[in-house]
Amino acid sequence: MKKQILVAGGTGYIGSHTTVELQNNGFEVIIADNLSNSKIEVLDGIEAITGIRPIFEKVDLSVIEETEAFFKKYSKVQAIIHFAANKAVGESVAKPLMYYRNNLNSLMNILEAMKEHKIPNLVFSSSCTVYGQPDKLPVTESTPRKEAESPYGNTKSISEDIIRDTVKAHPELKGIALRYFNPIGAHPSSKIGELPLGVPNNLIPFITQTVAGIRPELSVFGDDYSTPDGSCIRDYINVVDLAKAHVVAIERLLKNKNDSNYEYFNVGTGQGISVLEIIEGFERSTGKKVPHKIVARRPGDVEQIYADTSFANKTLGWKSESSLDDTLLSAWKWQENLK
Ligand code: UD1
């Protein structure tokens, strides 16, 4: 019998790619999603790639009654991957209560259900945002977390604490938090990818929409940072590579290979890339010009951050494999496919 994994937020960007990798590795996936920031058609893409349509339930896991009803029906799942959260930094500054309520309630409701139905394993979507602007680069897992720059970032930090404290009090439960750096790109089939509703906040969808003629030009937020070319530096991780890290984390928990009940890993490439280098890379890999102008810094942006991934490489046996150019090309092919 296939092992059942609940993917909360499975029609979203990272959730859909992870569902594909789980199904390709022999797991049965149940997706729970409220479709607040994703579309049901994503299931067609997943099915086209894997030949399997995941089970889908429209449910809002931030609502306790809906969560309880859902888990009564699916109490036999062996593990949960929790992606279902709001993720727009700017929106979280404007609507902090919405972010705290949604992101924290859903996590706590899931943890309650894990206790009640004896579901031992949780993989949680965390973020490099928990490091703030680190004093030393690259960041390792022992780099101290800093006060979050935004309510969104704070929900990730608080969520990590909630998981840590809960598995400590309930040793039958185990959790792994994956601290993603900047996920980009799309599945090589171009059947699933990032689907921002409205004006994109993130760099790569803004670039692809600009090149597609949907936006007039990209604004580069600042060229006066203390970096070699003056623009901000991030660690851009291919979304399929990132999805594979979840499969490895799930297998680690299912096989009881974890060293402690709560573990956390950096999931990045280890390479710091500037915004201007992304534009160059996009132009190189696609042959398309990216119209852009330099504007003022975006409030709340950290100057630079990239991962030391050696802990994940050694402990999970996982590493990022795709080249930046291939990843940027995959993002463009996905955008073209949307036409
Ligand atoms: C942020 C969060 C990250 C979160 C992600 C999801 C922080 C430090 N990081 O990533 O945890 O998972 O959002 O939304 O809070 N840029 C431009 N022009 C644009 C858009 C972006 O120049 O139109 C630049 C930004 O200044 C930044 C880089 O591109 O230097 C990446 O920005 P973005 O894609 O928004 O991600 P982060 O802000 O790094």
Image (cartoon, grey):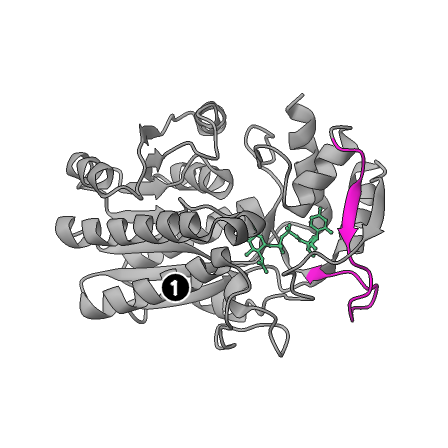
> What secondary structure prevails in the magenta region?
loop
Q: Height in image: 233 above or below 15?
A: below
Q: Residues in magenta?
A: 215-233
Reply yes or no: does residue 120 show up in magenta. no
Measuring from the top left, give residue 320's x and y in whole percent.
58, 55
Would you say 55 lies left or right of 246 here? left
Q: Which quadrant, please, contains the N terminus?
A: top left
The amino acid pointed to by label 1 is Ile
Would you say 303 lies left or right of 315 here? right
Q: Which quadrant, please, contains the C terminus?
A: top right
Query: Does the Cβ of the disc 1 residue fall within 8 Å of ligand 1?
Result: no
Q: Residue at x 48, y 58 (%)?
A: 151
The answer to whether residue 316 shows anywhere in this view is no
Measuring from the top left, give residue 53's x and y in whole percent.
38, 25
> Mark 1 sits on what residue?
158
Q: Residue at x 47, y 27 (%)?
A: 39
Measuring from the top left, give residue 301's x and y in whole percent.
65, 60
Secondary structure under tag 1 reads helix
Q: Residue at x 37, y 34 (%)?
A: 34
Q: Residue at x 64, y 24 (%)?
A: 338
| Mark 1: few/some/many CA within 10 Å (<14, 14-19, 20+) | some
The answer to whether residue 100 shows anywhere in this view is yes
Residue 68: quadrant of the picture: top left
